[in-house]
Every structure is written in structure tokens, then in C-alpha cells.
Image (cartoon, helix red, strand yellow):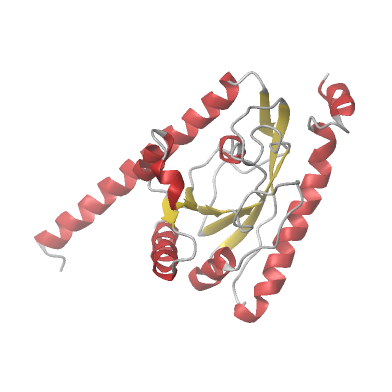
């Protein structure tokens, strides 16, 4: 039988878990509101997306700019973000990430990486998705960099499905190494789940290739609808 101490601990975990989920939802809604209030940004969701995510899920997304989290927050579910530790020191935004239960990681430090993966696993066990930018950094030119292994190893170790997310059009919203806002139309799309059941680390490269192929295909479909120097005229026609 569960003792009173165990019951109290369990109750505290449940309350804390709900509080962090609530903080996370509020923080993402704040991001959506900020995007709506930024006159230079026109963000939205491309295609149909599920209202809820069932089971253990690791999301992987390409990374164009600091505006990506604002755009991804338009998706209708809560998920915990893995981000570099320096982001958590930014006043208000970084503090909100910590309150929401997001996961900091210090680049180049093995202990930090292990602790971060352990926290990600705990969220997955509670049924809360986690999201990674497997390139590890923002793309300077819009082209995707190589995917790192972390998100895919986590999915394999946790028996989680992998769902690719594609963002397109945000690179000019907040260019790399700049806090100058740019005029853009940004879109986010959600791909097809990639199961990891029955797969092993021998399939790691195949998983990365499958996720990358989906993201590239979604970006190709969204690109004509975003404001870039080459496509702004076509985008305006599509949106009218």
C-alpha cells in the first residue's frame, strides 16, 4: 500500500506538473499575442494539424530565426522546449521559459546534456511532448544544416514517435545576429508521425533522413506563400 508520505509526494508531483503545464500554455499564448501585435509579422498555420497529441512525442523542427518559437506557438498544444542555457538568462522571456518547465542545455558540457535528456524523458513519461531544433543553431542562409543525434536518440530510448515540424518565412523576421524586426509572412506545418517501435540506434541515420525529407517537402510547399524577395508578389496574390 502507498504510505501517507508517498501519497503526499505523488499529489505534490501532480500539482507541480499541472502548474508547469499551465505556465507553459500561458507563456505560448503570450508568444502568439506578441506575434499578432508585431505589425511586421504575419504568422499562421499551414494545413491541418491535430488538436491533441497522443502518446510520447518528440517534435523536431528546422530553425530559421529567433522568431521560430513565436510561430510554433501557434500550434494548439503544449510542449516543452530544449534551448541553450543562455536563453534562460534573458529577462522576462528566459525566466518565463524556466517557469514553464522548459529545459536548458549548456553546449559542449556532457553533464548538462545528460541532465537535459533526463528531464526530457520525464516529460515524455508524463505524456508531455518535447521539441528540438536538431540543427542546433539557426540557419544563416535558410538552408538546413546537418541534424544532430540527440532528439532521435531520445525518441528511440523513450519509445516515442517523432513528428517533424517545418517553419518557413521567419528568417527575415529576426535575422541571425540581429534584433531588427523584418517584414515577413511566416508559416508552420506539421508532418506525419514517424514511429520508433522496433527500431534501434542502427536506424538513427534513417530516422534523421525521414524527418529531414518531410521538413524539406513541407517547406517547399510553404515557400511560395511567404514574403521573400523572390516570392512576395506571388504570396500577395495567394493571400488576396
Which residue is more in the foreground, 58 or 101? 101
Q: Is 34 above or below relative to 208?
A: above
Name which quarter of the figure residue 133 lies in.
bottom right
Q: Choose between 63 and 77: the one closer to the eye.
A: 63
Residue that appears at 54% across and 49% down: 53
Residue 156 is left or right of residue 119, and the answer is right
Residue 197 appears left or right of 139: left
Residue sitting nearer the eye, 239 or 193: 239
Position of 39 relative to 229 (above/below): above
* Residue name at image x 68 percent, y 68 percent: 207
The quadrant of the rendering that contains the C terminus is top right
Name above or below for residue 217 compared with residue 32: below
**In the drawing, does residue 71 fall left or right of residue 12?**
right
Residue 152 placement (x, y as % from top left):
59, 67
Q: Quadrant of the N terminus?
A: bottom left
Apparent side of residue 163 relative to residue 11 in the rendered image (left or right): right
Residue at the extreme left: 4
Percent x, y of residue 101: 38, 48
> Percent x, y for residue 57?
54, 57
Q: Position of residue 149 (x, y in %)?
A: 60, 68
At 73% across and 64% down in the image, what residue appears? 210
Residue 75 quadrant: top right
Residue at the bottom extreme?
Answer: 202
Amino acid at each position: 500500500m502507498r504510505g501517507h508520505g508517498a501519497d503526499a509526494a505523488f499529489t505534490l508531483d501532480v500539482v507541480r506538473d499541472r502548474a508547469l503545464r499551465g505556465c507553459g500554455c500561458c507563456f505560448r499564448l503570450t508568444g502568439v499575442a506578441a506575434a499578432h501585435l508585431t505589425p511586421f509579422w504575419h504568422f499562421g498555420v499551414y494545413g491541418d494539424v491535430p488538436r491533441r497529441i497522443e502518446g510520447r512525442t518528440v517534435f523536431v523542427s528546422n530553425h530559421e530565426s529567433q522568431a521560430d518559437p513565436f510561430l510554433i506557438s501557434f500550434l494548439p498544444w503544449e510542449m516543452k522546449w530544449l534551448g541553450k542555457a543562455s536563453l534562460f538568462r534573458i529577462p522576462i522571456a528566459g525566466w518565463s521559459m524556466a517557469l514553464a518547465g522548459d529545459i536548458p542545455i549548456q553546449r559542449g558540457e556532457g553533464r548538462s546534456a545528460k541532465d537535459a535528456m533526463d528531464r526530457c524523458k520525464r516529460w515524455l513519461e508524463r505524456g508531455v511532448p518535447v521539441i528540438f531544433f536538431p540543427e542546433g543553431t539557426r540557419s544563416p542562409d535558410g538552408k538546413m544544416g546537418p541534424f544532430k543525434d540527440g532528439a532521435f536518440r531520445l525518441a528511440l530510448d523513450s519509445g516515442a514517435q517523432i513528428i517533424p515540424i517545418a517553419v518557413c518565412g521567419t528568417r527575415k523576421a529576426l535575422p541571425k545576429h540581429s534584433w531588427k524586426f523584418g517584414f515577413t509572412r511566416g508559416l508552420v506545418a506539421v508532418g506525419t508521425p514517424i514511429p520508433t517501435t522496433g527500431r534501434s540506434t542502427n536506424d538513427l541515420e534513417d530516422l534523421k533522413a525521414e524527418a529531414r525529407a518531410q521538413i524539406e517537402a513541407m517547406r517547399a510547399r510553404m515557400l511560395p506563400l511567404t514574403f521573400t524577395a523572390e516570392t512576395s508578389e506571388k504570396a500577395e496574390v495567394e493571400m488576396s
